[in-house]
Image: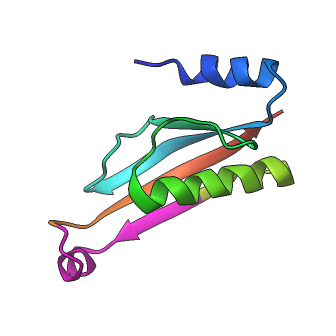
């Protein structure tokens, strides 16, 4: 398992602006368990994963916005079972991600 905090600290020591995203809650189908992390730099470096697909991109964008604002945020993503079937997925799910800039 990769030590995401060590990666964040190393990038910060190299002068990067860094944020860390952590899965804090899941329900139903979720690709990553609670505690999974993604480290993001303002310059676009990424390490780790909190989900996948479009959620991962949205979290990375929110992390950069959090770096710019200096404030943490909580992101909620979800899809109902009915919506999942409509788009060809087996089941719905929900994930909540806490994004925090490192200062």
What residue do we see at 46% from left, 59% from top?
55
Considering depth in this image, is 36 or 60 the residue closer to the camera?
A: 60
In-image side of 5 versus 13 (left or right) = left
Which residue sits furthest left? 90
Give me the residue at 55% from left, 24% from top. 4
27 w.r.t. 6: above or below: below
Q: Residue at x 79, y 47 (%)?
A: 67
Could you tell whether 61 is left or right of 27 in the image? right
What span is in magenta? 75-89
From the viewer's side, name the closer residue of 91 and 15. Answer: 15
Based on the picture, tell me whether residue 79 belongs to the magenta stretch: yes
Q: Which quadrant of the figure contains the N terminus? A: top left
Image quadrant assignment for residue 43: top right
Q: Quadrant of the C terminus?
A: top right
Pinpoint residue 21: horizontal percent, then vertical percent: 58, 42
Q: Position of residue 85 (x, y in %)?
A: 17, 77
| Viewer-nearest residue: 60 or 71 | 60
Q: Residue at x 54, y 38 (%)?
A: 38
Q: Quadrant of residue 47?
A: top right
């Amino acid at each position: 398992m990769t030590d995401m905090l060590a990666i964040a600290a190393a990038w910060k020591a190299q002068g990067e602006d860094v944020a860390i995203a952590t899965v804090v809650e899941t329900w139903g189908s979720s690709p990553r368990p609670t505690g999974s992390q993604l480290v993001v730099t303002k310059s676009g470096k990424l390490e780790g994963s909190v989900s996948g697909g479009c959620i991962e991109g949205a979290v990375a964008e929110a992390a950069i916005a959090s770096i710019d604002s200096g404030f943490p945020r909580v992101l909620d993503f979800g899809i109902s079972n009915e919506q999942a079937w409509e788009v060809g997925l087996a089941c719905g799910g929900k994930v909540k991600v806490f994004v925090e800039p490192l200062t």
